[in-house]
Amino acid sequence: MLEVRTLSKSFGGLKAISDLSFEVKQGEFLGIIGPNGAGKTTVMNLITGYMAPSSGDIRFEGRSLVGLAPYQISHRGVGRTFQVVRPFAEMTVEDNVMTGALFSGSRASSLAKARKAAALPMELVGLTHKRHMHAGALTLGEKKKLELARAMATEPRLLLLDEVMGGVTRGDVDDLMLVLQRIHRAGVTIVMIEHLVEVIVALSARVVVLNFGCKLHEGTPQEVIEHPEVIESYLGRPLETDAA
């Protein structure tokens, strides 16, 4: 479904992404992990058109995304969330989700159609009962759900998630995991960046590990968390002390 081919991105003399290649199969739940500064969000920005690659290619369902604007990539069927949620605080939950529907691939032609299209995303994330509440009054966990619903309203076949769990309580983490499982079961392919490794292990079938803009390792969650280089990239080398 998605092919990232020898992708590189430089900012002046700094190479943020270097010759990165990986694939995402239709129906897959892929996790991407790595230390701070590994290039994870940069990859998301490159796939969704918020940045242009220095070299390489990104292909979605056989067609290149390079050179397309973010709205064009969204219309192709690629949705995303952002690390920092920014709902329209004075608008209702339903109206927020409707904005996603209005910019969907099918481009709902009326507010009535957009309202109808917003119903399923709100149901998937569990916000139907709060559809008339102002978004600014939601908790952070609920705003994360709203971000997911708004992305789902664009009718993505591929959904990119950038640290959905960031900053929320343990209870919200458990709740959001159930939401993501529902979205995945609904037929959406998911690529997820997340610092909570236990979430990635629980949800992903395969994991890509980034470090300094390069792919460090790729495999099943269990293979990844047991790999010595992955452990070192997160935890550092253990201190070596002389025996007493």
Image (tube, helix red, strand yellow):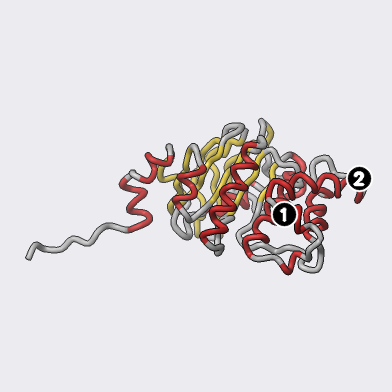
**Marks 1 and 2 in Cβ contact (< 8 Å):** no
Mark identifier at residue 4: none
The disc labelled 2 sits on which kind of residue? Ser
* Residue at image location 56% in from the left, 47% down from the top: 192
Secondary structure type for disc 2: loop
Percent x, y of residue 150: 74, 52
In this view, the residue farthest toward the left is 244
* Location of residue 241 (image quadrant): bottom left
Disc 1 residue crowd, few under 14, some 14–19, many 20+, Cα 10 Å:
many
In this view, the residue farthest toward the front is 129
Q: Residue beneath label 1, please?
A: 127
- In this image, 1 relative to 17: left or right? right
- Total labels: the figure holds 2
Q: Residue beneath label 2, please?
A: 109
Indicate which label's residue lies in the foreground, 1 or 2.
1
Q: Work out which quarter of the rendered image holds the N terminus and state it.
A: top right
* Residue at image location 54% in from the left, 63% down from the top: 169
The disc labelled 1 sits on which kind of residue? Leu
Percent x, y of residue 221: 43, 41
Percent x, y of residue 129: 76, 55
Q: From this view, report whether residue 173 is shown above or below residue 224.
A: below
Percent x, y of residue 9: 56, 51
Q: From this view, report whether residue 205 is shown above or below residue 236.
A: above
Q: Earlier in the sequence, mark 1 or mark 2?
A: 2
C-alpha separation, residue under disc 1 versus residue under disc 2: 24 Å
Q: Nearer the viewer, residue 73 or 234?
A: 234
* Residue at image location 52% in from the left, 38% down from the top: 22
Q: Work out which quarter of the rendered image holds the C terminus and state it.
A: bottom left
Secondary structure type for disc 1: loop
Disc 2 residue crowd, few under 14, some 14–19, many 20+, Cα 10 Å:
few
* Residue at image location 80% in from the left, 48% down from the top: 118
Q: From this view, report whether residue 119 is shown above or below residue 144.
A: above
